[in-house]
Image (spheres, rainbow, N blue to C red):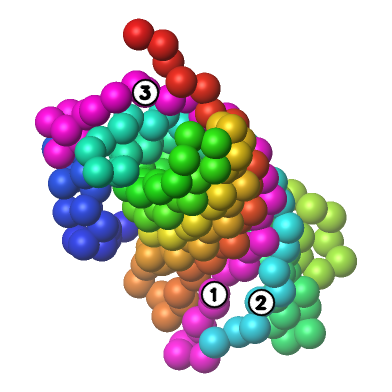
Amino acid sequence: MKFNATVKYLLAIMIALAPLTLHGQMKFGRIFGVNISEMTFNVNGISLEPTSMTGIHFGGCMEFPLKWGFAFQPGASFSAKGTSYDIDSITYLLSPIYIEMPVNLVYSFGSEVFRVTLYAGPYIAIGIDGMKIEGANPSRSIYYGSGEGKDINLFDMGMNFGAGISFKGLMVSAQYGIGLANIAPDSQSDIEMKNNVIGISIASFVTRRK
């Protein structure tokens, strides 16, 4: 899979600069929320119209304060995505489950009680489970990998953009995840598949005391 160069450079810069500018106390966060997701499909230059699906995500993150209201926030989460689509009157359903690892640059402003947060950054994801249904056939596990007999690629990557409001350490946020990798199992075919996800989350943060 070919990685988007812009995302790689952004990730490298964020990781390189963060240790040089850490300022203040580190926070630990627990995150739980809902995904509204779909996959874009282009087959031989023709776009299909997928139906969105609802899943969940949960996990954690660490927040390293920087200067001027910024913070560096890596994390990891369990994320259920998916979509359904029709080809020749047959309905297909794909519901992959990923371990997703975002690395966000966060900017917050406000008081200690009430704050507004904006964030953005790249993510990588690894498929660990999931379900596929073809027409009236029973459901089966998703086959990850590349080549004949596989359903989707094992790896995904993209960008997250989000905003949230927090009150006394409890944050409600919404984000949009844009898949940049073609997760079609055969990279030589004329099929392009990408994940797009709207996420709504509740997160609680605890400050690590020195």
> Mark 2 highlights which residue?
50
Q: Which residue is mark 1?
A: 40
- Give the residue drawn at x 54%, y 87%: 47
Give, as a single range, the part of the protein colored magenta.
Answer: 17-46
* Badge 3 density bin: few <14, some 14–19, many ≥20, Cα 10 Å: many
Residue 199 visible in the snapshot: yes
How far across and how far down the image is residue 34, in percent?
69, 50
Find residue 148 and report its horizontal and vertical position in percent: 49, 60
What is the CA distance from the residue labelled 1 to the residue labelled 3?
38 Å
Judging by the rendered image, the residue that carries numbered circle 3 is 26
Residue type highlighted by circle 1: Thr
Q: Is residue 205 left or right of residue 106?
A: right
Is disc 2 in contact with disc 1, using a CB cutoff of under 8 Å?
Answer: yes
**Is residue 123 at least partly visible in the picture?**
no
Q: Nearer the viewer, residue 53 or 32?
A: 32
Viewer-nearest of discs 1 and 3: 3
